[in-house]
Amino acid sequence: MVIRRVLAPRIDFGALRRELGLPEGFPAAAQREADEAAAAPLPTAADRTDIPFVTVDPATSRDLDQAMHLSRRPGGGYRVRYAIADVAAHVRPAGPLAEETWRRGQTVYLPDGNVPLHPHALSEGAASLLPDADRAAVLWTIDLDADGETVAVALERARVRSRAKLDYVGVQRDADAGRLPEPIALLPALGTLLTARGLRRGAVNLPLPEQDVEPDGDGWRLVLRGPGPMEDHNAQISLLTGMAAADIMLAGRVGLLRTMPPPRPEAVDRLRLAAAPLGVDWPAGRSVGEVLAALDASRPRAAAFIDQAAELMRGAAYTAFDGELPAQPEHGGVAAAYAHVTAPLRRLADRYATEVCLALHEGREVPDWARTALSKLPEVMASTDRTASAATRGAIELAEAVLLEHRVGETFSAAVLDVDAPSNGNAKPGRPPGGTVALDEPPVRARCTGELPLGERIRVRLVTADPTQRKVLFEHA
């Protein structure tokens, strides 16, 4: 669901690429291996091309990791078939391509083009689950009862064929019109069921709109959008699979989890105290996730409360284990043990966690190349997470500065999302008081100095918009 978009002039993201040290191309040996793998016949695997899978992704995406088919189980409940691109079928464990993917860690997305984990011959070609072509996949089959509880999990290497490349906007339109295609006709009902189960066990989701920069002819659009219902439902299938993967690895006592400590009680208490002043209803017995799910993020006071809730979601990491189970195996946002296995075209860790799951499910030894990698992956993924986050943040900050460069001195209406406070970790000695504001038009989020009323709408004056430093600063007017 697009909320706001504003056209920005031409922007050169080259300096940001150089600052982050992003590679411009693949080494010749790695590219050659990818080209050869793309041209090679598919490996032998179970033939599941009779299942009419579809993919659901942003309209412009071509690195398609997941394909889905949902059906009813005989006797009640649901069957989820989730095909994940089998990257290990194309990448040798110790070859030059594997070495390069370890250097990159994950795909980094920038408005003027991504920096892919794998060469496009694979990531947007032979390994991507594009429609009307046979592809190598790891197929998860997850059976749920009528209440959405998992009752059986199976996975196998398979040959699959997607029937259609669907996008979020079109799928949402079809859902609203009651004409979803058969492979995902059950997604609204199942997604709603899984979301409700998550909230009951304590899952927390921050429903803040996201900023993005998109090409628009010779210029760029600065976009603020929130996920539509179908996008949220789609995410529930990935979460379901990640939880199934975590359970397999914990039972086998070897693997790689995506972890985050549960919200600290004192942080929850502070958030509860912030609810009433911001006009947020927090009935007795309601969890944090349930309160957040009921909010309209387009309202300034609700958006400020959601921003305060972000303090609860700290400490995300990858946790490897082999033999001894982790002391804290859960992900606080999911409120369950969880693993990344559904995006191997874009994340290095998923390839290895998937291989561990396959071996454990089949009752065989985990391959040495996968097992020995587990302890090294957390550091690599943490480093590349920082790079990917810096790229996203830097691109938005640059677009904001370019968009506002010639409007210094103007005043704007803005909502106060956050104010400096020691408990938030954003009050710095010697820095003038202030906080974070979100403009209505253009959709900019930036620092503002002054004594700011949290959750209220105010007038702010633009004092700095510097594309070179990617800096935007307002003051309370």
Image: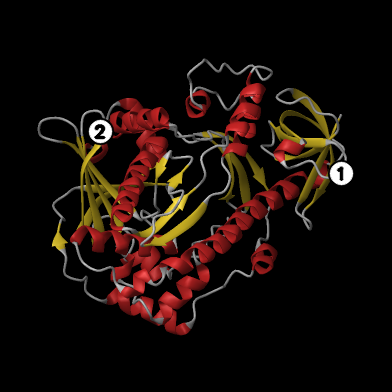
Q: Report the mark closest to the observer, 2 or 1.
A: 1
- In the rendered image, the vertical position of residue 121 relative to residue 251, given as above or below: below
- Determine whether, in the image, residue 312 is placed left or right of residue 46: right
Picture coordinates of residue 58, whole percent (x, y): 43, 47
- Determine whether, in the image, residue 387 is placed left or right of residue 140: right
State the residue position of label 2: 186
Q: 63 or 301: nearer the eye?
A: 301
**Label 2: few (<14), some (14–19) or many (≥20) C-alpha neighbours in 10 Å:** some
Q: Quadrant of residue 457?
A: top right
Which quadrant: the C terminus? top right
State the residue position of label 1: 431
Which tag, 2 or 1, sits closer to the chain's start? 2
- Identify the residue at image location x=86%, y=45%: 429
Type of residue at label 1? Arg
Given the current orientation, which residue lies at the most extreme left position? 74
- In the rendered image, the vertical position of residue 442 relative to residue 282, given as above or below: below
Picture coordinates of residue 18, whole percent (x, y): 67, 69
- Identify the residue at image location x=31%, y=62%: 356
Q: Quadrant of residue 437?
A: top right
- Determine whether, in the image, residue 70 is placed left or right of residue 108: left
Q: 435 or 247: nearer the eye?
A: 247
Q: Secondary structure at mark 1?
A: loop
Label at residue 193 = none
Picture coordinates of residue 243, whole percent (x, y): 34, 46
